[in-house]
Image (spheres, helix red, strand yellow):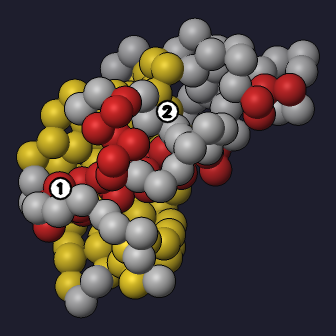
Amino acid sequence: MDIHEILEYLPHRYPFLLIDRVLEVVPGKSIHGYKNITINEPFFVGHFPHHPVMPGVLIMEALAQAAGILSFKTEGKKPTQSDVFYFAGIDEARFKRPVMPGDQLHLHVEIERHMRGVWKFKGEARVDGQLAAEARLMCAKRDL
């Protein structure tokens, strides 16, 4: 999926869209996408000016955005103005290495469970094949 198709599946826009491309989606199973990390990211102005590091919460958000795309692809539909996925929980989050300008953050998310509008995922974020962060994510689909 290129950026144009991603924009059809996520309500996020700059500066909060955290996926540049989706390389593979297996509906009902998994997604693999990535975010190119550049020095131009607005969060680097303050995190940290002398040693720019992508905030861990934004890595988790990037995984959640990938999970949102996977959820809609699994349902076989595109979101409408009234569909929204909310972050409902993060468990077992671990940060293994810093993510810095010049990195390509690969987002790997697998569905663990889906029941009554609540989805559970296992997510990993990798840079150059090395684990940067991992977590179990829970998202809830709601109609506005």
Q: How many marks?
A: 2
- In 3D space, how far apart are the residues under numbered discs 2 and 1 (Cα atoms)? 26 Å
Dot label at residue 132: 2
Q: Quadrant of the N terminus?
A: top left
> Which residue is nearer to you in this view: 137 or 142?
142
Vertical arrangement, residue 89 with respect to residue 143, above or below = above
> Which residue is nearer to you in this view: 137 or 25?
25
| Image x and y of residue 65, in percent | 43, 51
* Quarter holding residue 136: bottom left
What amino acid is found at the position of numbered circle 1 in the picture?
Answer: Lys
| Image x and y of residue 68, in percent | 35, 58
Residue 59 visible in the picture:
no
Label whose residue precedes the other's in the sequence (2 or 1): 1
Few, some or many residues within 10 Å of mark 1 (<14, 14–19, 20+): some
Q: Residue at x 77, y 21 (%)?
A: 52
For label 2, the SS is strand
Dot label at residue 73: 1
| Image x and y of residue 124, in percent | 37, 43
Q: Badges 2 and 1: C-beta atoms under 8 Å apart?
A: no
Vertical arrangement, residue 91 with respect to residue 42, above or below = below
* Quarter holding residue 2: top left
